[in-house]
Amino acid sequence: MLLQDALTQRIIIVLIVQVWPIFYGSILAYKILKRRKNRSTYTLATPFILNSITYFLATLSILFLNTPFAYILYITGIYFYAYCHCFFIILSWILVRLDDQAPFWKFILIVSFYGIISTYVFWIGFYFKGIRYDASTTWIPTYSLFFLLFSWSFLVIFILIPQIYFSFKLKKIFEGATLRRRINMYLVSFYLEFLVVFSVFLYNTWIDNQIYRIFYLVIMPATSTIAAFLVYKGFGKNL
């Protein structure tokens, strides 16, 4: 039967799970940028844009199976996935510095710094065989344990720890019920999305555990959608 073919099942799962983030990410980015264009809105919209590009490239790679382009498209998408979550930290930094807006060169420096360190995806994924995506894996993305641990370390050191620091700063700076509510929604959305990112890397490493993979496919897409909505509701709608 057609559905018994592993590749066919993967394509169906990809279309169901990966097309949705492209849709809502693009819509939310458009709504944010349509309302106002400044440093804050550009920074807030960027994670949605890069996340949409990530899933678009991963989906597009399916069309290039059995060619070198499949791997190139996929690993480039994972780079954007790692990079896009760095903009939560950049946005938090901007919010903390609202009263004394930081110089533009500092903003560019931080954006460039995160863009550069996110290239670990290429170095470890390609040169150290951290990401395999070819016929030998039946075109299922497979991460090595080293790549998983390195990615988790990257997330904790450069994203989670700075965000915990900024969380305390933001709670002190913003006063009033409305502002605190928005800050809380933003922070909750970050930690939900961080959980999703952690789970994504584990999902592509722990490929033999079907129970976890089913759990991920059922729970994490909804969790990511809720996180995106809370970001938009908290600051995207009225930044």
Image (cartoon, rainbow, N blue to C red):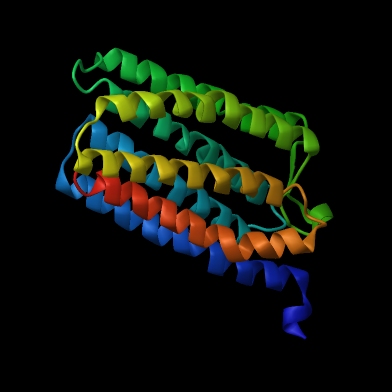
Instruction: Let me know if residue 100 appears in the view.
Output: yes
| Residue at image point 70% right, 35% down | 125
- Looking at this view, is 55 or 134 the one in front? 55
Q: How far from the left and from the top, in percent, is residue 149?
A: 72, 33
In the image, residue 174 sits, relative to residue 65, either above or below, namely above
Q: Position of residue 203 (x, y in %)?
A: 69, 52
Q: Which residue of the protein is positioned furthest toward the bottom in this rendering?
A: 1
* Side (left or right) of 122 relative to 6: left
Left or right: residue 94 versus residue 81 is left
- Image-quadrant location for residue 37: top left
Residue at 72%, 80% in the rendered image: 3
Q: Is residue 170 left or right of residue 132?
A: left
Q: Is residue 13 above or below residue 154?
A: below
Q: Quadrant of the N terminus?
A: bottom right
138 or 13: nearer the viewer = 13
Q: Is residue 122 visible?
A: no
Q: Determine whether 62 is above or below 174 in the image.
A: below
In the image, farthest residue toward the left: 36
Numbered marks: total? 0
Q: Position of residue 209 (x, y in %)?
A: 80, 58
What residue appears at the point 78 percent right and 39 percent down from the top-left corner?
Answer: 144
Residue shown at 26%/20% (left/top)?
A: 97
Quadrant of the drawing holding the C terminus: top left
